[in-house]
Amino acid sequence: SQKIEQNSEALNIQEGKTATLTCNYTNYSPAYLQWYRQDPGRGPVFLLLIRENEKEKRKERLKVTFDTTLKQSLFHITASQPADSATYLCARGNTGFQKLVFGTGTRLLVSP
Amino acid sequence: KAGVTQTPRYLIKTRGQQVTLSCSPISGHRSVSWYQQTPGQGLQFLFEYFSETQRNKGNFPGRFSGRQFSNSRSEMNVSTLELGDSALYLCASSPSSSEKLFFGSGTQLSVL
């Protein structure tokens, strides 16, 4: 079955540092991977989408990579701020469908 | 534009009862999908609707059903509630040409 694995342990970093979150997938490469941010009591908010044929995508302080050899995506937040503290979800999907397979998320804590 | 609206926000039911959850997508979005989120399993896909037709269904028992109306609003129903149905139920909408999902804040269902 298609799975997404994310580190379930919280990631604690200091303000100003770069946070790197890992997402590993099993079986065949998905058409794309998506990253979402979720705050307590709220629904996930879309951040970035990267397609299978793309190596890297950037948006402001965010960067995501897609490595089909390692079956892995890395999500980076540079110059992290306490406001970046949240749970980050990785999801795999295929073109034409809204069915996403989500990982359980990694909680990021940025201390001042 | 208003975001995805889900009602009610909180719901408490007892085992054996049934429940109906409502979702109003972002104006112009024709695709609506539903996810169940629990601490242990993360987000799991329930079903997706597009133009009143169910396009995809997750691995949930037949007690879980849904529908979409001509104005794209959607409802999901859970009959014969079990304790394990306690979860955050999230609705997401998307434009026809996009893979990214816009989530509502969810309905927190507690089954006693």
Image: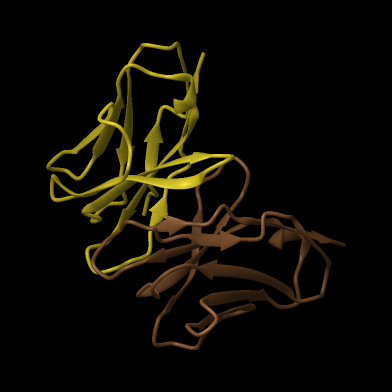
Chain colours: A brown, B yellow
Residue A4 vs residue B66: left or right?
Answer: right
**Vertical placement of B33 versus A58: above or below?**
above
At which x and y percent is residue A26?
47, 67
Q: How many callouts does the rendering have?
A: 0
Quarter of the image that includes the N terminus of chain A: bottom left
**Vertical placement of A42 versus A106: above or below?**
above
Residue B27 vs residue A25: left or right?
Answer: left
Q: Give the residue displayed 13% in from the left and 50% down from the top.
A: B51
At which x and y percent is residue A95?
27, 70
Residue B23 vs residue A12: left or right?
Answer: left
**Vertical placement of A57 versus A11: above or below?**
below
Q: Give the residue displayed 27% in from the left and 49% down from the top.
A: B32
Quarter of the image that includes the C terminus of chain A: bottom right
Q: Give the residue displayed 63% in from the left and 70% down from the top.
A: A22
At which x and y percent is residue A67?
52, 83
Q: Nearer the viewer, residue B102 or B39?
A: B39
Residue B89 vs residue A65: left or right?
Answer: left
> Would you identify the image quadrant in which residue A12 lies?
bottom right
> Would you identify the image quadrant in which residue B78 lies?
top left
Q: Nearer the viewer, residue A39 or A104?
A: A104
> Would you identify the image quadrant in which residue B96 lies?
bottom left
Q: Give the residue displayed 55% in from the left and 81% down from the top.
A: A70
